Image: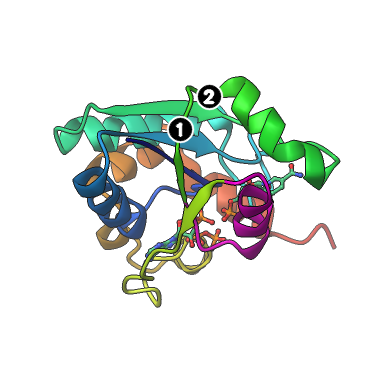
Amino acid sequence: MRAFIVGRFQPFHNGHMEILKRILHENDSVIIGIGSAQFSHTLKDPFTAGERHLMISSALEESGVYNYYLVPIEDVNSNPLWVSHVESLTPPFQRVYTNNPLVKRLFYEKGYEVLSMDLLNRKEWSGTSIRNKMIRGENWKKDVPPAVARVIDEIDGVSRIRDLSESDE
Ligand SMILES: Nc1ncnc2c1ncn2[C@@H]1O[C@H](COP(=O)(O)OP(=O)(O)OP(=O)(O)O)[C@@H](O)[C@H]1O
Ligand SMILES: NC(=O)c1ccc[n+]([C@@H]2O[C@H](COP(=O)(O)O)[C@@H](O)[C@H]2O)c1
């Protein structure tokens, strides 16, 4: 069975890694959609699709995981068309894993099997909380795989987020 998961992965963190490992216990392979691929350089979406691709592929290589496909997916301005848009970009899949209510609803209406995931250590393992830690100068590296921390250092990601958080007044 081939499974699909989509997220913005801003950044890819330990919660994402844990659920991917769980998904791969139940499926032969997983398609990882890098959602909102057109966005970068904002506080909610600081990293480009290419930077997120590098974070995820480096972290999975570091963990010895190779049975995955990584597909950047730009948003479209019509929710009813989004599932077809996803299908036009990815290998075929049978199952969708998500906690996002809109994603759940859209795939359910197209007849897919949709499964929810346990939220793990959500206080620390959340993109929002990790981006806030970067702005405040707190320790965020423990919340992401070591390879992701190396990519964020390589692209000077923390100073990007701090610059974006500054007001122009
Ligand atoms: N700690 C976690 N445990 C389990 N699933 C998670 C965890 N964090 C995120 N997910 C799930 O992974 C998918 C993609 O998540 P997403 O990229 O939005 O991360 P996020 O941490 O929720 O980010 P943000 O805070 O920026 O919205 C979603 O279905 C989300 O519910
Ligand atoms: N109309 C659309 O383009 C549409 C609809 C539903 C979800 N999505 C995307 O799916 C992703 C869901 O991931 P999150 O759980 O991280 O929000 C986001 O990138 C979101 O923009 C896009």
Nearer the observer, 29 or 129: 29
Please tell me whether mark 2 sits on a helix, a strand or a loop.
loop
Note whether 41 is above or below 131 in the view shown.
Answer: above
- Give the amino acid type for the residue marked by disc 1 in the picture: Phe
Q: Label 1, on which residue?
A: 93
Query: Which residue appears at 25% of the width and 61% of the height?
Result: 142
| 85 is within the stretch colored magenta | no
Tell me, yes or no, if residue 38 can be seen here: no
The residues colored magenta run 97-111
Query: Which residue appears at 66% of the width and 58% of the height?
Result: 105
Residue 54 locus on image (x, y percent): 39, 28
Q: Do the residues labelled 2 and 1 touch (CB within 8 Å)?
A: yes
Q: Which colour scheme is used?
A: rainbow
Quadrant in which residue 168 is drawn: bottom right
Residue 49 locus on image (x, y percent): 56, 31
Describe residue 109's horizontal placement relative to residue 91 as left or right: right
